[in-house]
Image (cartoon, rainbow, N blue to C red):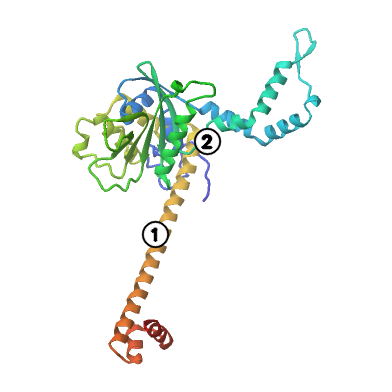
Amino acid sequence: MTRRSAENDLSDYEPGLRKQVFVRPTYDCTARHMLDDDNVRLDFVKTFACLNDVESTTILDESLTNFRELIRKRETKSFLRQFEQNPDSFIFKKKLSDGKELDNTAAKDLIVGLQENYNDLLAILPQERNSQLDFLCKLNGDHVAVAVQIDNLNYRDNRALGYISSAYQNRLRKDEDWEGLSRVIGINILGEGDWKDKTAPLKRYIMQDEKNPNNVINGLELYQYSLEDSDLENSFFEGKKGLKDWLYLFKNAQNVEEVPNDVSDEIKTAYERLRIEKMPEEIKELYINEECWFEGYIEYGKKIAEQTEERVKKETEERVTKETAINLLNANYDVNIIKIATKLSEEQINGIKNNLR
């Protein structure tokens, strides 16, 4: 796939971004940009995590992820390795206003601590994850961590479970009491759900006693929304206009030409943050790269489907031919007649015949 550079108007991009007014909101870069607005993010969390009493939200882990990438750099590892082998060869100085230099013991202590705890730091700092956002929500004096996935990759259920479990564990830092663990809610917005029940686009998972449903452990929750299975005219959405409007945005923003008039101010702002002509250049470039990847992914999926269809067709034809030969052999037809009827060679027919004995 060719990675393209973003021009000011994206006019070199196909298919037809000039015809598009808004970008596709289900890509990692555009979802992050859209939800970077405080009011949009607050309304999103209230709607999709069913937390009506949320007072505020804060995006987590962005700076920590950057710090993790910094200490993972090859140069950082090489420096720490050299420091470990011969710490006395490194001199740390600080320059005073009068020009004099003094030993900077604080800087040396910092490097010593970083070197000694390097592996532990890597373990607790957040991993870089595709299509995932972390929010910390203040709720009636308490805090709830909300983990968002907007994708449709393989093993999505395993990924979701592993991710929210990791997010739950990471809420407890070293030397903290267990009461420091806050609730974690996962939100999955999936392109396809493959759900048998098409009447509702939502699945909610909680830790519940199988024999007594009233026994629930409040710690992990997972909300899954399927865009493909969201029939927005279904009775499920009665009294849920906010959810309906949000799902419409995720499904159709790239196909509409103007912001719907009857949506909330927060959703109107979300549309405006997805407007192509207002997108920051760096977001445009990321978007085009993700769009190119998506096109390649779709083409790959089509090719695999075509190959599978051809293979199944061939296997079916071979099975029918073999069954026909077996039936004719059992009816004591002559081999020459079977050859004409099945287009099999005499050798192939004799092989089938031998297997019947």
In screen coordinates, is 115 left or right of 216?
A: right
The structure residue drawn at horizontal position 25% and vertical position 40%, both measured from the top left corner, is 200
Farthest-out residue, top: 98
Q: Residues within 10 Å of mark 2 (few under 14, many from 20)?
A: some
- Write down the quadrant of residue 355 in the picture: bottom left
Q: Are marks 1 and 2 in contact (CB under 8 Å)?
A: no
Reading the image, the residue beneath label 1 is 305
Q: Is residue 234 left or right of residue 32?
A: left
Secondary element type, mark 1: helix
Find residue 325 and report its horizontal and vertical position in percent.
33, 83
Q: Secondary structure at mark 2?
A: loop
109 or 284, nearer to the observer: 109
The one of 210 and 85 positioned closer to us in this rendering: 210
Query: Which percent across, then down, holds residue 157?
Result: 39, 43
Residue 85 placed where, x, y %? 77, 32
Mark 1 vs mark 2: in front:
2
Q: Is residue 21 visible?
A: no
Question: Looking at numbered disc 1 in the image, what kind of residue is underneath it?
Answer: Ala
Question: Which residue is found at the position 40% from the left and 63% from the top?
Answer: 308
**Neighbourhood count class around disc 1 (C-alpha, 10 Å): few under 14, some 14–19, many 20 upward:** few
Q: CA distance from mark 1 to mark 2?
A: 31 Å
The picture quadrant where one finds residue 134 is: top left
User: What residue sits 20% from the left and 30% below the top?
Assistant: 239
Label 2, on which residue?
128
Which is more N-terminal, label 2 or label 1?
2
Q: What x and y, as percent, mark residue 9? A: 46, 37
108 relative to 75, above or below? above
Q: Quadrant of the C terminus?
A: bottom left
Instruction: Identify residue type, mark 2.
Output: Glu
Labels in figure, total: 2
